[in-house]
Amino acid sequence: MLVELLRGLKTTFKAMFEKPVTYQYPEVKRPVRPRYRGRHVLKRYENGLEKCIGCALCAAACPADAIFVEAAENTDEARYSPGERYASTYEINMLRCIFCGYCADACPTEAIVLTDNYELTFTSRVEAIYTKERLLEPVRGEARPTPQQTPPGVYTRAVPKMADPQD
C-alpha cells in the first residue's frame, strides 16, 4: 500500500516540475497537424475565375448531406468559371458537416479544400450556413465576385409533397 502511494506521489512530483503547455489564445495560435481538416474554402484560378463548375459531386459525396449546390449556365456577359456552368448557389451547413474531407476528394477541379483554420464560431443557425461569399477566397486582380442567387439558408431543393389524406 505504501509502495502505491509513493508511486503516485512520484508521478505528481514529476509533473510539478514540467513546463506547462499553455497557449495564450487568441494572441498565440496553436499549431495544427499537416493533415488537419478545418474551414472550407472555394478556390479561384489566377485570373479570378472560380474553380467550382457546379457539378455537385461534393454534395453527392457528403455523408452528412451538409452541402447544397445549384448550378447555372455561364454566358459571355457573365462568366464566373471557365466551363459551361458555375455554382450559382453553394452552401455548407457547418452544423451538419463532420469535416471528413470527402467533398475535397470528390471535386474534379480541386475547387473545395479544407484549410487549417479552426476558428469556426456562430451564434445562430443562419450564421452556421456558409454561403458562397463566405467560402470563396478573396478576389485577386480585376475579376468581379460571384453573387449568391438565394439568401443564406434558403435551399431551393424540391421538397417532396406529402400525400393528401382526403384523396
Image (spheres, helix red, strand yellow):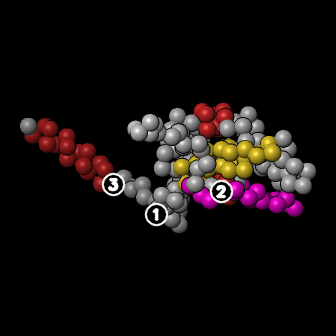
| Residue density around tag 1, few if under 14, some if 14–19, many if 20 or more, within 10 Å | few
- The secondary element bearing badge 1 is classed as loop
Q: Quadrant of the C terminus?
A: top left
Looking at this view, is 60 or 118 the one in front? 60
Q: CA distance from mark 3 to mark 1?
A: 40 Å
The quadrant where residue 143 appears: bottom right
Separation (CA) of disc 3 from disc 2: 58 Å
Q: Amino acid at mark 2?
A: Thr
Q: Position of residue 87 (x, y in %)?
A: 73, 47
Question: Of the numbered discs in the image, which one, if any, rests on residue 17?
Answer: 3
Between 122 and 35, the residue placed more toward the observer is: 122
Residue range (magenta) = 137-153
- Identify the main secondary structure in magenta: loop
Mark 2, residue position: 150
Residue 63 visible? The answer is yes
Which element type, helix, strand or loop, lies under badge 2? loop
Q: At 42% across and 58% down in the image, what residue appears?
A: 22
SS at badge 3 = loop
Amino acid type of the residue that numbered disc 3 sits on in the rendered structure? Phe
> Was residue 160 drawn as part of the magenta stretch in this picture?
no
Residue 7 badge: none
